[in-house]
Image (cartoon, rainbow, N blue to C red):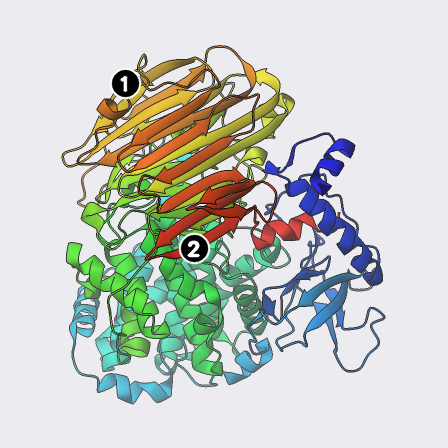
Amino acid sequence: MLAKMLNAIFPFESFLGCRCGIWLLFAVSFFTNINGAKAGNEKRDFLKPEIVHPRFLDAPVPSSGIEVRSNPPVLRWPVTKGKNVKYDVKLSKSADFVPGENYLEFNGIPWAIANPHQKLDLGTWYWKYRKSGGKWSEILSFNIGENAVPIVSPASDLFLNALPASHPRVLATSGELPGLRSAEMNKDIAALFREAEASLKFVPPSEEYGIAKKEGEDEEQTRKFQLDASKRLGSLVYSNTLPLCQAYILSGRTEFAEKAIEIAMAVSDWEPRGISSLNDFGDARCMLTMALVYDTFFDKLSEKQKLKLLQSIKPRAEHFYNEWVNQLESKVLSGHVWQHILHYFFQTAIAVYNEEPNAGDWLEYAYELFLARTPVLGGFDGGWVEGVSYFRMNMETVIDIPLTIKKFTGFDFINVHPWYRESIKWMAHHIPPGSAADGFGDNTEEVLLPGKAYIEYATELAKLTGSPLAAWYVTECRKYENPELSKSGAFRWTRITKTGNIPMPESSEINLPMGAVFRDVGLSALHSNITDTPNNLMVAFKSSPFGSYGHMLCDQNTFNILYGGEKVFYRTGYKITMNDPHRTGWYRTTKSQNGILIDGEGQPYSNGSYGFISRFVQGEKLAYVKGDATNAYKEGSLAVKGIKKVVRHLVLLKPDIIIIYDELEAEKEVNWSWLIHSFEKMEIDSVAGFFSVELKKTKGQGRFYSSQEMNWALTDTFEIPAHNWRGSKNADGSLKAYDDPQFHLKLTNRKKSRTIRFLTILQVSPSANLFHTLNGNIPDKNGVVNIQLDDWNISANLNNENSPRLDIKEQNGETVFSLFFEELLFNGKKIVAAKEESSVLIELKNENLKVQEISDDYPNDMWQKLVISD
């Protein structure tokens, strides 16, 4: 009733594309405005779409009385640009900020972060900030409830004071040397010594080695060749120095020390801001090469050598610090920094702390930044929004920095922050054992198995958290591949010095549900049999509040389908370089995805081009997820179209049926295009409405229905061709060839319309027989499609004049799903909706009735933006 009354006052159907969501937000707005009045004047504009994750933080968090997830929360605010900017913060249980109990004050902070580093009392807290000497912000508020996760890290000065005055400190401490040098030989140590022995023959290159040997066809290609050459230079000296330092720690052999010092002193002769600094990875590796030698061989270096190394380390570290401070903490992502460079910087600062006067500032910043922002592209519920491929670049950083902090302070960030344990669930669902990856993010199409990286990472998490799921993941992965981990340097030193003696938890039988959802990052995966990859149908879905940025693609409300671990319907193209025309014109665009185009245009490459997963429910035989990508189509050339709704409902029915139901609406008449792609040859029958692909062991068949007549277009070429001008190679050393045909099906309404609905039924399995079963099945005169497929009855409304409807019933009556319901009868029992337009999943098993009613729900960050200060 309330919704109907409000609809008469505000004549629009949805906000952020969700039914009745606006009325819920209106209520939240009303009550938080009343509550917020106590805290000052926190302004709000609830009817204005906000970017959930802007490239730079544009409003202070937390605010508007939101209930925070951690105790204490980290306070963050938009940076004030300029040199030597400092901030003051006040935090209190009283809006009057009277000093005393429950009052904290931070003064002269050189970065836009304040971590209280102590557990706060439950209830409402108030805070404000300012540029030191300037005007205070408005008063902000948040609430700490009983469910807030305690994440109480030590203050940075406690960490710095815990570092030993003596060297070494980074790879090991002097007190650990006797134990390490008496350790029994194992595969990791043997492999390390082999690498160190090989590095004894290494001749340090001249700085000119970092000059590119060829030019590209344009300035961008030439620039990339130069960056690659600079990176190779830094990587070459680092990859030879690291095993020498580690082998010396384990053996004390003089020849390892002499060679490592030789390399580091050669690097110290290079111009710190010259050729070797052009690539930030190469620059950081040069820096860490010298820092590791300075720390590991401190007692073997002459005073002149120490001074030379410090003088060469400082400008590189200062460059990173000055580039980052009062900026990086406010930025949603700086990929290279979080992948490796922050880790290198952290280690460098530890190595020269006390001897380099500015190292204390470097180290304090790295410490506070890591604890405040990790996981920078994840959330409390797991997941990594940049994708399975690029997460591999972050694995060592997110493990080693916390282990170093724990080593010197005892604070166990890995077991305190929920993301670590939840990330195991994300791996199990989005890169299952024996399976290719989910398909989201740059280079994910190249991840055909979890590989060494995920087996190593899961092994460390299993030991560090005691997670049976992580242990199961490792055991299952090794049934399909069995890499020798000692040949990989990523976690070898971690095993040798920190986790080698920690036993793996028991890998018992794991009973995983059909699916999982990670709302914070907008990912979900549904499975028919997740613990049996050869017989598993996997449907991965994405609709992310992060939008499109960095290595994220324009892929809100898109899906990828795999069976038996192989890609059946999957997005297409290649990431050659970030700015290559093929990537910018095809690969990262919605055109390459299993998604929706509007007037031939996809989602802009922007943080404002976001979506979210608003509903998820699963049972024994059915799993359902809803994505809303309305805001992903409101920028750029699409802004004038007045996009009102881009909503996708996706259902998986065991064992092999997938249902996709799209609700699309705009203010202007447009062409709506439904896309699906495959690496395998696709066959179509546009008259009958069928499309299909066939793999060696699997068939993928689809039947498409629409509320309007559609044009079908199938191609096997890219709009923008792909060329391997960079000379990228496969794992076996062969050049990558971008000449294999990939297939792209686009279905577009013949007559432009404001609204349209699509229904797609897919069957993916070795025994798929959709053509025979659904042949001749068309919507009735009311626009309703009624389908009987195997054990399921499916009914969907495609008539734009009527309310959307999708009803699914198992023929034996044990499972019923209704997309929007008011009431229904189940085995003679009347079930009435508690909320308007909610969805319901009803299951009967062993005479036990289970009813799950769901309505739109938002990730925490979405709520933060909906009630944020304007």
> Which amino acid type is shown beneath numbered disc 2?
Lys
Residue 432, relative to residue 559: is it above or below? below
- Where residue 548 appears, x then y in whole percent? 50, 39
- To which quarter of the image does residue 91 belong? bottom right
Residue 443 in which image quadrant = top left
| 254 displayed left or right of 332 | left
Tag 2 secondary structure: strand
Q: Residue at x 54, y 57 (%)?
A: 319
Q: Residues within 10 Å of mark 2 (few under 14, many from 20)?
A: few
Which comes before the other along the chain, label 1 or label 2? 1
| Residue picked out by circle 1 | 684
Task: Determine if residue 225 is in view.
Answer: no
- In the visual, does 34 lie left or right of 72? right
Q: Secondary structure at mark 1?
A: strand
Asked if 534 appears above or below 790 in the picture, the reply is: below
Which residue has dot 2 on it?
850
